[in-house]
């Protein structure tokens, strides 16, 4: 588990180096124009949507570790190629390799966490993963910002080379991992691939969680760097430096609050925690509305806008130990990889649709934008409470597993071994 967490931090650190500067690199530094830069960002989403349906099956059949290693090699090659690419075709092919690798890493690492954790430690494991991801992205972005120089292509080539090196270091770290035995489907007949998806779609609780997940990612993550930032600049007059402060406030809230929030949510129903996140995000959208539509001073508008991102960070910290472990608990034995990949696919769809819808609205339809996403946040609360009625007691309250063992007078395995 320690190696997995180190891997998460390293991959996030590498991505933090390049992601904030990708558009500038393609459009300005390489001189390929905004159209090509937009296509590169689209290729990331398309590559993820193509590979994720197959990634889940590969994880189930081969295990998460081989799939992760293949994804890391693909990402390393894509990153290095992106730093050396000088024309549009090479840039798009490199982006496809990097995007596919990044997309497959998520469910592979999530399945490794599931396989290496028990039900009572899983929430803390996913919370630690999320904490390290945000810390790595923040530190990587900060260092990368001091290394880049838009007048020198070589500075960006160095950035992408460092990212590729991080992926290869992660290959070396992960190659030393010895995964515990978990059920595999190596001998399953070919038709079972269709059966796996049919089984997943027949799980009503998982379908409801996927719908809820789409709304979560669409209404929050899909707006960070598109609709919400456009709304802040156009409606609230937020400066680019203030926008950077807002993004930093989001990361800082996650890093500072993650483990305090974990203690709060560990003994509460998962469905109600998610419902509470919807209410917190509704308050965040009200704050954003005040920043852009209110008549206060510029200082008040900026403070309200920064608080919007901080409130989103608080909600994210509550979701990290809640949603991913719930996906694992809904998966039948040996199917965690397929369920994690399906949920990652839902996330990618939301992240593709969110900016496309929110960007134009945030830039021009200011009041409708706020009202729309305020209603989406309240919809999260309603969907979460509805999902809670379909979950079993143990799925919604995972601590009951251990408390019932104690109540029946059964000793935990560690005690028996001692």
Image (spheres, rainbow, N blue to C red):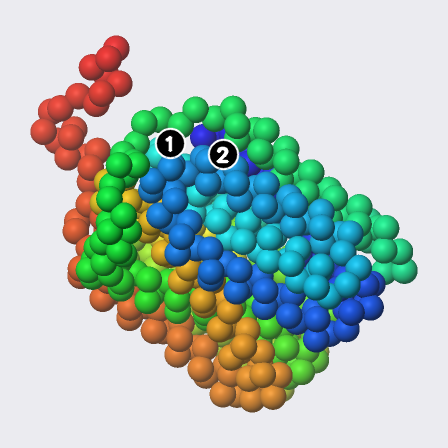
Furthest-left residue in view?
Answer: 408
**Residue drawn at 45 percent across, 35 percent down:** 65
Q: Would you place residue 175 above or below residue 34 in this image? A: above
Tell which of 219 and 152 is nearer to you: 152
Residue 202 image offset from top left, x and y in percent: 19, 60
Tell which of 141 and 393 is nearer to you: 141
Q: Would you place residue 307 above or below residue 6 in this image? A: below
Neighbourhood count class around disc 2 (C-alpha, 10 Å): few under 14, some 14–19, many 20 upward: many
**Residue drawn at 39 percent across, 79 percent down:** 375
Q: Is residue 23 visible?
A: no
Q: Which residue is under mark 2?
A: 4
Please give the count of numbered marks on the rendered protein.
2
Q: Earlier in the sequence, mark 2 or mark 1?
A: 2
Dot 1 falls on a residue whose secondary structure is loop
Dot 2 falls on a residue whose secondary structure is helix
Quarter of the image that includes the N terminus: top left
Q: Would you place residue 59 above or below residue 243 in this image? A: above
Residue 205 image offset from top left, x and y in percent: 22, 59
> On the picture, is 178 further left or further right than 193?
right
Quarter of the image that includes the C terminus: top left
Query: In the rendered structure, are the residues bearing label 2 and label 1 in contact, judged by CB atoms less than 8 Å apart?
Result: yes
What is the spatial separation of the Cα atoms under label 2 and label 1, in whole angstroms? 9 Å
Q: Which residue is under mark 1?
A: 116
Furthest-right residue in view?
Answer: 151
Residue 53 image offset from top left, x and y in percent: 39, 56
**Residue drawn at 71 percent across, 59 percent down:** 90
Residue 216 image offset from top left, x and y in percent: 41, 65
> On the picture, is 187 further left or further right than 285?
left
> On the picture, is 380 further left or further right than 139?
left
**Residue drawn at 42 percent across, 59 percent down:** 345
């Amino acid at each position: 588990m320690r190696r997995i967490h180190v891997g998460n931090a390293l991959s996030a650190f590498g991505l933090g180096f390049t992601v904030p500067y990708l558009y500038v690199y393609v459009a300005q530094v390489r001189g390929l124009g905004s159209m090509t830069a937009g296509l590169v960002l689209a290729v990331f989403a398309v590559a993820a949507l193509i590979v994720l349906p197959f990634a889940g099956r590969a994880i189930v059949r081969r295990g998460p570790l081989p799939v992760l290693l293949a994804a890391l090699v693909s990402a390393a090659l894509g990153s290095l190629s992106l730093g050396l690419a000088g024309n549009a075709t090479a840039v798009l092919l490199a982006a496809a390799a990097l995007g596919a690798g990044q997309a497959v890493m998520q469910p592979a690492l999530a399945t490794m966490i599931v396989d290496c954790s028990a039900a009572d430690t899983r929430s803390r494991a996913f919370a630690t993963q999320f904490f390290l991801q945000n810390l790595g992205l923040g530190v990587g972005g900060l260092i990368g910002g001091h290394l880049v120089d838009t007048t020198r292509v070589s500075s960006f080539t160095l950035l992408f080379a460092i990212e590729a090196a991080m992926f290869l270091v992660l290959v070396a770290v992960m190659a030393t991992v010895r995964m515990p035995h978990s059920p595999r489907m190596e001998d399953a007949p070919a038709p079972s691939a269709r059966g796996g998806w049919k089984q997943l779609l027949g799980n009503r609780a998982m379908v409801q969680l996927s719908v809820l997940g789409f709304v979560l990612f669409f209404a929050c993550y899909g707006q960070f760097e598109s609709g919400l930032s456009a709304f802040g600049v156009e409606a609230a007059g937020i400066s680019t430096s203030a926008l950077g402060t807002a993004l930093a406030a989001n990361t800082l809230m996650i890093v500072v609050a993650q483990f305090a929030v974990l203690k709060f949510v560990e003994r509460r129903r998962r469905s109600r925690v998610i419902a509470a996140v919807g209410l917190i995000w509704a308050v965040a959208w009200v704050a954003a509305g005040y920043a852009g539509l209110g008549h206060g001073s510029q200082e008040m508008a900026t403070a309200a806008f920064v608080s919007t991102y901080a409130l989103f960070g608080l909600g994210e910290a509550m979701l990290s130990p809640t949603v991913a472990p719930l996906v694992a608990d809904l998966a039948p034995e040996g199917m965690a990889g397929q369920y994690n990949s399906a949920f990652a696919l839902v996330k990618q769809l939301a992240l593709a649709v969110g900016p496309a819808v929110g960007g134009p609205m945030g830039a021009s339809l200011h009041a409708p934008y706020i009202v729309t996403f305020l209603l989406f946040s309240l919809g999260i609360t309603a969907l979460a409470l509805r999902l809670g009625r379909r979950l079993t007691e143990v799925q919604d309250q995972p601590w009951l597993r251990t408390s019932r063992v104690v109540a029946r007078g059964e000793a935990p395995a560690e005690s028996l071994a001692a």
